[in-house]
Amino acid sequence: MHITSKELRRLWLDFYKERGHVDIGAVSLIGDGQTGVMFNVAGMQPLMPYLLGKKHPLGKRLCNVQGCIRTIDIDSVGDESHFTFFEMMGNWSLGDYFKKEKTQWSFDFLTKKLGLDKDKLCASVFEGDKNAPKDDETAQLLQQVGIKKENIYYLPKKDNWWELEGEGSIGTPCGPDNEWFYPLHDKSCGKNCDINCNCGRYVEIGNDVYMQYKKIGNDKYEELKNKNVDTGFGFERLLMYINGLTDGYKIDVFLPIIEYLEKISGYSYDKDAEHRKSMRIIADHMRTSTMLIGDVKGVLPSNVGAGYILRRLLRRAIRHARKIGIESINLVNVAEIYIDKVYNDSYPLLVEKKDYVLNNIKIEIEKFNKTIETGLKEFDKVISGLKRKVEFMQKSNPNYVSTKEDKTISGKSAFRLYDTYGFPIEMTIEMAQEIGYDVDEDGYKEAFMHHQELARNASAIAKSGLASEGEMETKYHTATHLLNAALKQVIGPSSHQMGSNINSERLRFDFACDHKMSEDEINRVEGLVNKWIDQDIEVTKEIMPKQRAVDIGAEHQFIERYPDVVSVFTIGGVSKEICSGPHVNRTGELGKFKITKEEASSSGVRRIKAILK
């Protein structure tokens, strides 16, 4: 069976619309700040409030095809299966139908709509443990719809159970899931070549999560009255299987891009294996870059947060364009193909923002092109210098054995490539690895911090933002630590202090953030700070060696500016920071915390002003 990407999208949505679902459409790729992640990484993520009990305005049966971005494995992109942008086909029951309907519908869609062989289709279910029973119900339903008994596998909690973890997870829904598997081919690698085999023959194509329990404690659950279903099927992966492909970059989403790259480079994707990886990286990174800039909350290249990820993707694509001998300006044409031919129907906003998207990609390419040539020469000089050092040592001592240090680029050299030539540290690491070298990443971080220190007003930093050290200034300083901790919980770990200023009437705090904070985010930050104040947490001070403070995870800015012995202030389990300023003894002394203003400070940096009542 041959199915195009546009046909698969329509088949999914029509299938569930026929069964009473409403297409809720795709939301922004950029995280809303409520889940602590920079991007939406799963189709269900934007629906979390409704899975937790909030009523959805469009009803109890929902479906969509949601774009997602995962950048944790950027370095893996280049093989046949990794993508930074991908789509999830989802459908949900919010307290409506449950296992019986869902097993039947998933089976029908896969076998009747997509033509997958029911005898090859496999599934896994929860094997049960001392805290929750074996999911025999789903296993029996799977047999009833047509899955062979021998193709149903009972797997442990780590494989077939979904629940939220950490603070705030108590009281949330959770439960077993049913994962669907299909073989890429019929050739067994040997004995017991099934879904548990790591040979790669079987790959998960979808997942039905049955939220039938309420989490009441660690490994403690009770039955829910209103049970939910959360389904997610990988769009690109299914498209590959349906069309009998084993290379994800041969689906029609990428095909026009690969054909264009072949045409302008003169290389064949199939025949020139040494250039295939570069073609895949260009195809993937330009797709993600196009989607990020064209998103409803579109970001632009920068050195902070989501903008940094975007810049890294674009610059990596530029480098690989050079590797296959094409002018990097042609990457603008790649983005245009995605907008005009691939996603013109499914993402109409891309078409509306076409000129904006292409222009900003062009600006980033031109900006990087000004320095990449000399930067690559500088990189070669660094490598040549390391090689000459080894040659000299070997000539001086014929018994000299080369060390790891001999093939490691120093932190200062790596920072120079970043600061002067715009090479993200990840690019320098990748280029080094390609020729068998390492990079001193810790040394790079030290050089980076030292550079930031020099760029700031030394006297202002030394005073930690304090104009004087009266009673109110002391309170505001402790409040700043609580604010910093709250922002990390609400915005995410990428949020970090960029500067502060305190007087007797207010605090001002600058922090890394790639978007204007929503009213909900502001309220959540304010609420967390006031919760910690109400808890009247003890503030303790401990003097220790600077390195020990770093080792125990104390927050810090510009570590090189601190003396060898530092003060670490700890506020319960909320905050631990290296600091030279004064603090109150308990958070209860602070009074009521109120955010009065949230605004832009500079590109990728937001500013909060707050008072204590």
Image (spheres, rainbow, N blue to C red):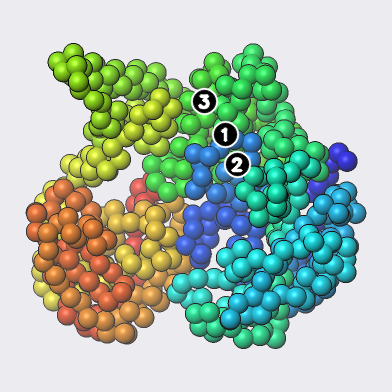
Compared with 205, 34 (above or below) is: below
Give the residue at x 45% y 74%: 167
Horizontal side of residue 215 vs 565, given as left or right: right
Looking at the rendered structure, the kind of residue marked 1 is Gly
Q: Quadrant of residue 382?
A: top left
Compared with 323, 542 (above or below) is: below
Where's residue 583, x and y in %?
16, 73
Foreground mark, 2 or 3, reads 2
In terms of secondary structure, where does tag 3 sit? helix
Q: Is residue 50 visible?
A: no
Compared with 268, 594 (above or below) is: below
Q: Quadrant of residue 525?
A: bottom left
Identify which residue, 534 or 179, lies in the foreground.
179
Give the residue at x 50% y 71%: 165
Looking at the rendered structure, the kind of residue marked 2 is His
Other-residue count near label 1 (Cα within 10 Å), few / some / many at <14 / 14–19 / ≥20? some
User: Which of disc 3 and disc 1 is earlier in sequence?
Assistant: 1
Q: Quadrant of the N terminus?
A: top right
Q: Is residue 152 visible?
A: yes
Q: Quadrant of residue 201?
A: top right
| Residue named by callout 2 | 82
Other-residue count near label 3 (Cα within 10 Å), few / some / many at <14 / 14–19 / ≥20? some
| Residue named by callout 1 | 78
Horizontal side of residue 521 vs 118, given as left or right: left
Horizontal side of residue 160 vs 297, given as left or right: right
Instruction: Point out which mark residue 320 bears.
Output: 3
Instruction: Point out which mark residue 469 bears.
Output: none
In the rendered structure, are the residues bearing label 2 and label 1 in contact, judged by CB atoms less than 8 Å apart?
yes
Identify which residue, 99 or 485, lies in the foreground.
99
Alpha carbon distance from label 2 to label 1: 7 Å
Where's residue 355, x and y in %?
61, 33
